[in-house]
Image (tube, rainbow, N blue to C red):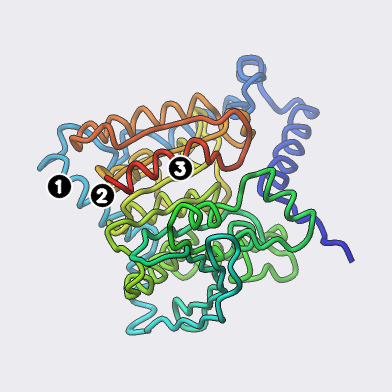
């Protein structure tokens, strides 16, 4: 039986967006002023009353940790306090409390055959009681210690297989090739020990959406259960990456001073937050994910499961770059990516660049655009990574 096509994040959000726009326009719901002004900009096409409401509740005057030069104590104090509050906000402190003294357990299969300079091995890590995250470990040939790459994926139910180049069939292989998505293979070929983990709620581990109560979206089901318990989905995903990092740091084959985290879409969001919360990540590359939290009229760019309650009071996504500075950070986006606004990406990048200037290392932040859509751009990412990792 051929593999059933699984709707991607782009598919699902485009369907919802177009349906909503069609109903609103057909009913005459939009006021003439906003619709006439923004009909060419779907990210800002809310009616006047909604725009006023959203601008009021997203009032920048209420933001606590958006970086400013006159922050009491200066940049380092801001960075420390912003990181501590971010950890609390995404629920990491709650997860620590929930897990108690749980010790993650790791099970590994036997290494596979030589795949042309590297081997691929399946693993399973219990990051908290009864939560088991499968992953692929790709190991380059030769003697270590090797730099480490942790590569969380986005909305793809077999995303860790995709990243590891473990194609299920010809159609899957074609998709991997077209999207240049086998980043764990690319990392191993460049001398990294590469971990391609399942991202909780986006792949097999998570809370299934029973009876389709949450839109038939497992990622949303995960989020709802997290919120009821004082957690967030992004916090659980960061926790999983940190436990994988803990384990890898115990292996002699890994150079703990050279750790890359990189992911696309939802995996890029995990990369951004994990790198901000964990200084052990030495190079971060979020792909097709770095932008503003919302457009000027309040449109939210990311899937529900990437959102954090109260985040707009803490700051914006460019402020999440602050706790990463001065470590190297490259944000990559596609100019044809229909999920994001190029102008808002550029605004976010300008603010992140200012934060890196304040850290004293503006050269460690870069923002680049590929010419296509919502995918990896290896030709932009790897030169930055290899330079940063060898510095």
- In this rendering, would 109 be left or right of 190? right
Residue appearing at x 50%, y 43% in the figure: 287
Q: Residue 46: in sight, yes or no?
A: no
Q: Which mark is residue 382?
A: 3
Spatial CA span between label 1 and label 2: 8 Å
Quarter occupied by the C terminus: top left
Q: x%, y% of residue 177?
A: 68, 47
When asked about the image quadrant of residue 93, the answer is: bottom left
Spatial CA span between label 1 and label 3: 32 Å
Mark 3 or mark 2: which comes first in sequence?
2
Q: Nearer the viewer, residue 363 or 253?
A: 253
How many marks overall? 3
Spatial CA span between label 3 and label 2: 29 Å
Secondary structure of the residue carrying numbered label 1: helix
Disc 1 residue crowd, few under 14, some 14–19, many 20+, Cα 10 Å: few
Q: x%, y% of residue 165?
A: 63, 58
Q: Residue 33: in sight, yes or no?
A: yes
Q: Which mark is residue 281?
A: none
Residue picked out by circle 2: 82
Residue appearing at x 72%, y 43% in the figure: 16
Residue picked out by circle 1: 77
Q: Nearer the viewer, residue 349 or 105?
A: 105
Disc 3 residue crowd, few under 14, some 14–19, many 20+, Cα 10 Å: some
Disc 2 residue crowd, few under 14, some 14–19, many 20+, Cα 10 Å: many
Mark 1 or mark 3: which comes first in sequence?
1
Badge 1 vs badge 3, beta-carbon distance below 8 Å:
no
When asked about the image quadrant of residue 179, the answer is: top right
Q: Nearer the viewer, residue 235 or 229?
A: 235
Q: x%, y% of residue 239?
A: 41, 67
Q: x%, y% of residue 112?
A: 60, 74
């Amino acid at each position: 039986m051929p593999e059933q096509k699984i709707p991607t994040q782009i598919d699902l959000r485009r369907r919802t967006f177009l349906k909503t726009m069609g109903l609103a326009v057909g009913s005459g719901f939009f006021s003439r002023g906003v619709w006439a002004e923004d009909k060419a900009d779907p990210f800002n096409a809310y009616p006047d009353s909604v725009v006023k409401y959203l601008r009021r509740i997203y009032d920048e005057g209420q933001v606590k940790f958006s970086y400013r030069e006159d922050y009491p104590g200066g940049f380092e104090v801001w960075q420390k306090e912003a990181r501590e509050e971010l950890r609390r906000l995404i629920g990491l402190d709650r997860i620590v409390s929930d897990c108690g003294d749980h010790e993650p357990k790791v099970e590994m299969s036997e290494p596979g055959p030589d795949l042309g300079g590297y081997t691929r091995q399946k693993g399973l890590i219990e990051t908290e009681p009864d939560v088991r995250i499968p992953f692929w470990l790709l190991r380059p040939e030769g003697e270590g210690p090797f730099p480490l790459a942790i590569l969380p994926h986005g909305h793809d139910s077999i995303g860790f297989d995709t990243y590891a180049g473990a194609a299920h069939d010809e159609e899957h292989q074609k998709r991997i090739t077209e999207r240049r998505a086998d980043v764990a293979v690319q990392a191993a070929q460049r001398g990294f020990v590469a971990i391609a983990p399942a991202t909780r709620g986006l792949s097999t581990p998570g809370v299934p959406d029973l009876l389709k109560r949450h839109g038939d979206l497992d990622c949303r089901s995960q989020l709802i259960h997290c919120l009821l318990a004082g957690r967030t989905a992004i916090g659980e995903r960061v926790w999983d990456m940190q436990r994988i990092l803990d384990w890898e740091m115990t292996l002699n084959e890994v150079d703990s001073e050279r750790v890359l985290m990189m992911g696309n879409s939802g995996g890029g969001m995990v990369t951004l937050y994990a790198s901000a919360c964990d200084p052990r990540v030495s190079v971060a590359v979020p792909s097709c994910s770095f932008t503003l939290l919302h457009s000027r009229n309040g449109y939210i760019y990311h899937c529900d499961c990437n959102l954090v309650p109260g985040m707009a009071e803490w700051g914006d996504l460019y402020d999440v770059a602050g706790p990463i500075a001065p470590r190297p950070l490259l944000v990559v986006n596609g100019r044809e990516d229909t999920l994001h606004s190029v102008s808002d990406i550029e605004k976010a990048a300008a603010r992140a660049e200012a934060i890196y200037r304040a850290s004293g290392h503006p050269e460690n932040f870069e923002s680049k655009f590929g010419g296509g859509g919502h995918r990896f751009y290896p030709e932009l990412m790897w030169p930055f990574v290899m330079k940063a990792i060898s510095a």
